[in-house]
Image (cartoon, rainbow, N blue to C red):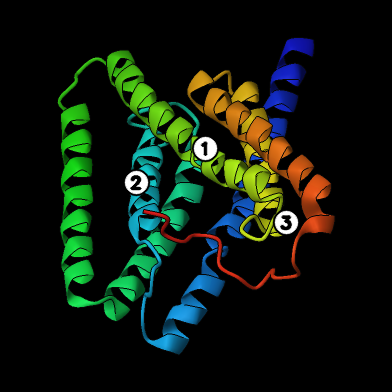
Amino acid sequence: MDVLGSLQTLATCKDAAGIAGNIFAFGLFLSPVPTFRRIIRNESTEQFSGLPYIYALLNCLITAWYGLPMISSDNLLVTTVNSVGAVFQMVYIIMFIRYAEKAKRLRMLGLLLMVFGLFAVIAIGSLLIVDFEARHLTIGFISCASLISMFASPLFIINLVIRTRSVEYMPFHLSLSTFLMSTSFLLYGIFNFDPFVYVPNGIGTLLGIIQLFLYSYYKRSSRDNSGEPLIVSYS
């Protein structure tokens, strides 16, 4: 009975962490809204880059696929949060294409087709793997690598904050959402004994802590410009 009770408690904690992660993720999904308000207002994508949304879409699709029962056990909350994330990214990409100049529009359309093509190869290829454990490990490593690279992207912003001694391009709500969502799924992965979830989210939690520390440290020297968009093109 004690073992059964412990397992039930563990399952409850896992579900609670997963639900919290789904809720906190909306802070990340909504973070580009100021950017697109400006794009719609000016009817131009200006110097903004659409690549972050393309990459985020691919990451969401791969990770949502990993969470399905045919790939991994008891990870549906991973699928739900990434499915919602994929919808948000598609909306942002469609809006970006709508207001982009012709050359950038064609490039975005090409990249979007590449994302769907690559995801189709990954999904169909995984279904051809008969052994469940081999299928789980294959998609798990792909999903983990994708998540780690996504969580590593704030390193550019962290470097920018340190160089400029300003948090202008690192809004507090985004850093907080990153920390809360990553921490939630770190716990979710630990409770579910899934390294493909807790390893990348552990990295995301660490980066979230660094961002919050830098925000606190450099806030006084920053301009009050919280309405500026985060994702811009520096290329």
* Discs 1/2, front: 1
In the image, residue 116 lies at what x, y percent?
A: 20, 50
Disc 3 marks a residue whose amino acid type is Phe
Q: Position of residue 20 (x, y in %)?
A: 68, 46
Residue that mark 1 sits on: 151
Residue 143 image position (x, y, % from top left): 38, 31
Q: Amino acid at mark 2?
A: Leu
Q: Which residue is mark 3?
A: 172
**Is residue 123 at least partly visible in the picture?**
yes
Q: CA distance from mark 1 to mark 2?
A: 16 Å
Q: Is residue 54 above or below residue 183?
A: below
Q: Residues within 10 Å of mark 3 (few under 14, many from 20)?
A: some
Does the residue at mark 3 contact the one at mark 1 (Cβ under 8 Å)?
Answer: no
SS at badge 3 = helix
Give the mark nearest the N terminus, 1 or 2: 2
Q: Which mark is residue 134?
A: none
Q: Nearer the viewer, residue 139 or 217?
A: 217
Could you tell me residue 207's position as x and y percent? 64, 35
Q: Which mark is residue 61?
A: 2
| Circle nearer the N terminus (2, 3) | 2
Instruction: Check the image and report above or below for 42 versus 28.
Output: below
